[in-house]
Image (tube, rainbow, N blue to C red):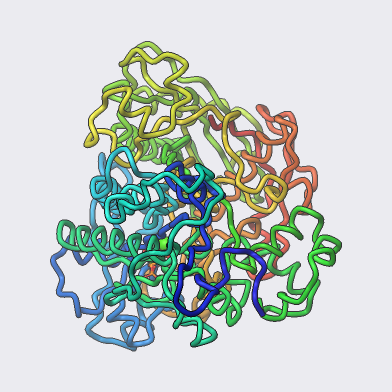
């Protein structure tokens, strides 16, 4: 079956010699320079680090590449390098099981904050101290920032669009960069179009063979298509793959990490591409290969189709495969799923995804949290944790430029969860005007804590979390409102901050109202942040909430009869999946924080009168009222795999940004 979209037609339909033309126009070529999502020539890459936390530990410890290594959190594994995977070890294994499979496995525990300590550290005995330690992902955030900085450095400053999508992945819109390379390599393209008519077709590229080097090239359904001469869409994607190959080599050389990448015409396809062959490979999905690439695939692998929406599609059409969905008329999809979602699905399974790469990478809030097992019972115990949270958040604020007054949070929120799941929270503003320090954060947190514990029934306490939000830019430069509306890199340049200092959390946030929406109608299915972009909320454990590729496989619980002499193997060994957006989280605490984030976001969206996922799609029941919230509700995860009664809780209002 051939698709109607011009993007996916074979690139030069007319055979034989003679003056053949490209299927692309002068106008479509020029659109490339402005990252236009309507250019059929756009090139997007997705780069994802291989077994990221595991590589981070290998680099840190100088471990040989072929040495099996896994990253341990309490008794579970949260990252497994490829040598260890060849023994059948995966994230679902416990340390004990993994060592049985491979006795020479190195299981490196994540860094932790120890109660009373000033800073996180790698503690040899962390695994047996779940009660007094708290996981820190700081070392990985730091590496993530370095990698992001390197990627940005590898691209021309004024021709890059980089979206940090999670702690270990980015989307790159290479369109404008490729456009400039293309004009250099093929100067004939700079000629004005015949009759000055931009709708005129371009000449065909003056080449017949493209060198894909070691790229994994997605095959074509029909070998005949391969015989067609390359058109400009093939050439641009080839240039894209050269750029990505260089970036990957640069990361490897400078920092020692391998990563995999997908290069395609949009975000969805590029993400599928990066996961197609791992580790250390890049996959190119040419337009002419899209149909074949997708038709053999389950649609549940596609971003946003892994979860609830995917389930709904499966039950509506009785299939999991794209192939079976292709003959379904758009009208029927609209009927079953609603107009917007129906159209979105219809396009998506045809490889059409007009969503933009967003260069915003700024954090909007930070959260530090701990679940207590067993619960804690008095104020002193709580205060010890508040001290750690304050130190944790402060050290991250320093990275964010709080000392230089580059950015600072406006609000602080303390969140308390009782043993029965009921929650309380208090919020206050952070005094402005002087440099924020750790002691101030700690004092504010204690203050909020004493307000909360004045209420009845706060003990035992099962979870505490401290967050800061409402980040504002400091007044270091003379920023007019105009600069506020500039996009990331422009804004940074206009502020004159150095690249080094602004890496990782660099760009200038546009006000919420200005935010672009990729797929406006179906937003309710895709909570904006936390699922598809790691930029906004930086939680102590949720940086990695993106990858929705095959979430089902990873929802497996750890073997229930696991032994191990550490503390009671609680929920930490279970990979958790958010029932709302399919984000994968490494433990119940991270999941809880993530759900809290959704809830706060819903409230915020509700305030703006938006229709959100929560109020349209999940079972919402009224929960306990809290002091700061005008309304609060408890969420019922409806997906069986992640359903857990402990997670139902009332929730009070958090203000982010
Ligand atoms: N991560 C986690 N818990 C999860 C999912 C991811 O802690 N439920 C962490 C992993 O430790 C990982 C990082 O987030 O290193 C990135 O996750 P992902 O890209 O999904 O997996 P990788 O471990 O990088 O492996 P792959 O090579 O398959 O990308
Ligand atoms: Ca990865
Ligand atoms: Ca990833």
Among the 4 quarters of the image, the one containing residue 118: top left
Among the 4 quarters of the image, the one containing residue 74: bottom left
Q: Residue at x 46, y 50 (%)?
A: 29
Q: Which of the pair 651/613 is nearer the observer? A: 613
Q: Which of the pair 194/502 is nearer the observer? A: 194
- Location of the N terminus by quadrant is bottom right
Query: Which x, y percent locates residue 655?
Result: 58, 30
Query: Which x, y percent locates residue 110?
Result: 31, 60
**Is 495 drawn above or below residue 575 in the view shown?**
above
**Is 68 drawn above or below residue 483 in the view shown?**
below
Q: Is residue 528 left or right of residue 360?
A: right
**Is 22 drawn above or below residue 630 in the view shown?**
below
Q: Residue at x 31, y 24 (%)?
A: 437
Q: Is residue 389 left or right of residue 320?
A: left
Question: Does residue 251 appear anywhere in the picture?
Answer: yes
Q: Residue at x 64, y 69 (%)?
A: 349
Q: Which of the pair 553/588 is nearer the observer? A: 553
Query: Which x, y percent locates residue 245?
Result: 27, 64
User: Which quarter is ligand 3 in?
Assistant: bottom left
**Is 608 drawn above or below residue 290 in the view shown?**
above
Q: Which of the pair 329/534 is nearer the observer? A: 329
Among the 4 quarters of the image, the one containing residue 579: bottom right
Question: Does residue 569 appear anywhere in the picture?
Answer: no
């Amino acid at each position: 079956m051939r698709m109607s979209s011009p993007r996916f037609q074979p690139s030069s339909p007319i055979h034989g010699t003679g003056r053949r033309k490209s299927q692309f126009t002068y106008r479509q070529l020029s659109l490339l320079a402005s990252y236009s999502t309507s250019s059929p020539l756009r090139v997007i890459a997705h780069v994802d680090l291989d077994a990221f936390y595991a590589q981070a530990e290998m680099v840190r410890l100088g471990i040989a590449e072929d040495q099996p290594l896994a990253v341990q959190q309490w008794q579970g594994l949260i990252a497994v390098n490829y040598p260890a995977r060849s023994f059948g070890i995966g994230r679902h294994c416990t340390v004990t099981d993994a060592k049985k499979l491979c006795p020479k496995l190195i299981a490196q525990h994540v860094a932790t904050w120890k109660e009373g300590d000033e800073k996180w550290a790698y503690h040899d005995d962390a695994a047996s101290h779940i009660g007094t330690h708290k996981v820190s992902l700081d070392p990985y955030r730091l590496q993530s920032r370095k990698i992001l900085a390197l990627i940005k450095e590898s691209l021309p400053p004024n021709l890059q669009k980089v979206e940090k999508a999670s702690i270990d992945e980015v989307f790159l819109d290479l369109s404008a960069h490729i456009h400039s390379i293309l004009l250099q390599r093929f100067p004939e393209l700079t000629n004005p179009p015949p009759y000055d008519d931009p709708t005129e077709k371009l000449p065909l590229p003056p080449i017949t063979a493209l060198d894909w080097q070691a790229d994994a090239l997605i095959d074509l359904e029909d070998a005949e298509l391969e015989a067609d001469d390359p058109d400009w869409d093939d050439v641009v994607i080839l240039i894209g793959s050269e750029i990505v190959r260089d970036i990957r080599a640069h990361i490897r050389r400078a920092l020692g990490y391998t990563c995999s990448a997908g290069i395609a015409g949009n975000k969805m396809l590029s993400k599928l591409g990066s996961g197609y062959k791992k580790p250390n490979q890049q996959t190119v999905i040419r337009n002419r290969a899209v149909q074949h690439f997708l038709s053999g695939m389950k649609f549940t692998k596609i971003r946003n189709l892994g979860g609830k929406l995917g389930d709904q599609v499966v039950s509506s059409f009785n299939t999991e495969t794209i192939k079976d969905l292709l003959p379904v008329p758009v009208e029927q999809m609209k009927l079953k799923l609603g107009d917007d979602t129906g159209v979105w699905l219809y396009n998506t399974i045809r490889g059409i995804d007009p969503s933009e790469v967003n260069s915003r990478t700024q954090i909007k809030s930070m959260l530090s949290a701990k679940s207590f097992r067993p619960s804690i019972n008095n104020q002193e115990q709580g205060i010890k944790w508040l001290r750690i949270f304050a130190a944790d958040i402060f050290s991250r604020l320093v990275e964010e430029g709080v000392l230089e007054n580059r950015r600072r949070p406006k609000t602080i929120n303390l969140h308390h969860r009782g043993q029965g799941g009921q929650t309380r929270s208090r919020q206050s503003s952070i005094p402005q005007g002087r440099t924020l320090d750790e002691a101030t954060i700690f004092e504010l947190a204690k203050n909020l804590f004493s307000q909360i514990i004045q209420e009845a029934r706060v003990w035992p306490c099962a979870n505490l979390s401290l967050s800061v939000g409402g980040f504002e830019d400091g007044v270091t430069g003379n920023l007019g409102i105009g600069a506020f509306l500039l996009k990331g890199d422009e804004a940074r340049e206009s502020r004159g901050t150095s690249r080094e200092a602004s890496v990782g959390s660099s760009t200038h946030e546009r006000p919420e109202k200005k935010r672009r929406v990729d797929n406006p109608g179906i937003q309710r299915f895709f909570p904006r942040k936390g699922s598809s972009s790691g930029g906004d909320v930086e939680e102590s454990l949720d940086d990695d909430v993106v990858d929705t590729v095959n979430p089902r496989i990873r929802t497996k619980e750890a073997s229930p009869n696991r032994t191990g002499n550490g503390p009671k193997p609680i929920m930490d060994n279970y990979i958790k999946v958010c029932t709302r957006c399919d984000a994968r989280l490494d433990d119940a605490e991270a999941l809880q924080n993530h759900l809290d984030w959704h809830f706060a976001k819903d409230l915020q969206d509700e305030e703006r009168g938006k229709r959100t996922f929560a109020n349209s799609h999940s079972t919402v029941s009224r929960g306990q009222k809290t002091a700061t919230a005008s309304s609060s509700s408890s969420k019922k995860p409806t997906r069986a795999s992640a359903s857990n009664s402990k997670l139902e809780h009332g929730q009070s209002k958090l203000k982010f940004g």
